[in-house]
Amino acid sequence: MSGVATVLAKTREQGRAALVGYLPVGFPDLQGSIDAMVAMVESGVDIVEIGVPYTDPLMDGPVIAHAADVALQNGTRLADIFTAVRAVAHAGAPALVMTYWNPVLRYGVDRFADDLARAGGAGLITPDLIPDEGAQWIVAAERNGLDHVFLVAPSSTPQRLRSTTSACTGFVYAASSMGVTGARTSVGDAAEVLVTRTRQMTATPICVGLGVSTGAQAAQVAAFADGVIVGSALVRCLADAASPADGLTAIRELSAELAAGVRRKR
């Protein structure tokens, strides 16, 4: 099994969901982002999604879009991803890169897969790449032992759910709300409905991205999902901090709260 599959099998044995934390590389700067990712792992995050800053983040809400813009202004480049991957892997968590597809194409699909594997990465999440158009990536990923994670959404038809889940390794990413990313104040029933529909198509673990921002919300989602994905709330810890040290403190505190949430009895 891949590192991601191993973690999800372990958390399932423990009777809990996994906590998946997202941060973009390069925000507030390169070293600051790496320090924050390591702090997340040390505070209970099971899997880290490392975001690639992109000039046209169509699916990202204002918090992540702002962080990506700052990272790009700081001079962050795609090669910096591999530095972050090495640090996360060294800290003891699988590192999944989350990126729009164009940067990988420009870098070179085979070259990217080779470099990601050499850095100790676990795989790639591609929000704007569907399996029908992902054959080149799937071949390169499998040659390097990398996971290829695709997304399903409330609008996915049964046929699309079946084809997407059959192409996923590691987990299926359930984007359970339509629109851009961002923290939300409540958890509705759309996520659970999507997970139920998706489970009818696959035995692969399903991790939910919903805009979770508190331990209580994490516990709600953990009751029906294999993993809880948190992004904007963690990025905001760094964005709202008065200093880098304050940002790391906030990241540790929120990660610990979320980790406690996914560990509550189902």
Image (spheres, rainbow, N blue to C red):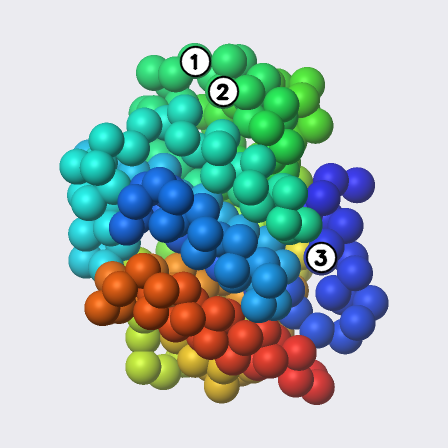
Query: Does residue 205 appear to the left or right of 232 in the view shown?
Result: right
- Disc 2 residue crowd, few under 14, some 14–19, many 20+, Cα 10 Å: many
The circle drawn on residue 8 is 3
Quadrant housing residue 22: bottom left
Give whichever of 138, 76 is nearer the camera: 76
Kind of residue sitting beneath label 3: Leu
Query: Does residue 40 appear to the left or right of 102 in the view shown?
Result: right
Residue at point 59% right, 28% down?
Answer: 119
Residue at point 39% right, 16% down?
Answer: 107
In space, the residues marked 1 and 2 are separated at their CA atoms by: 6 Å
In space, the residues marked 3 and 2 are separated at their CA atoms by: 25 Å
Q: Mark 2 points at which residue?
A: 112
Q: Mark 1 points at which residue?
A: 108
- Disc 3 residue crowd, few under 14, some 14–19, many 20+, Cα 10 Å: many
Q: In this view, does 220 lie above or below 44?
A: below
Residue 235 image offset from top left, x and y in percent: 33, 60
Q: Do the residues labelled 1 and 2 touch (CB within 8 Å)?
A: yes
Q: What secondary structure is found at the residue carrying circle 2?
A: helix
Q: In this view, does 223 lie above or below 178?
A: below
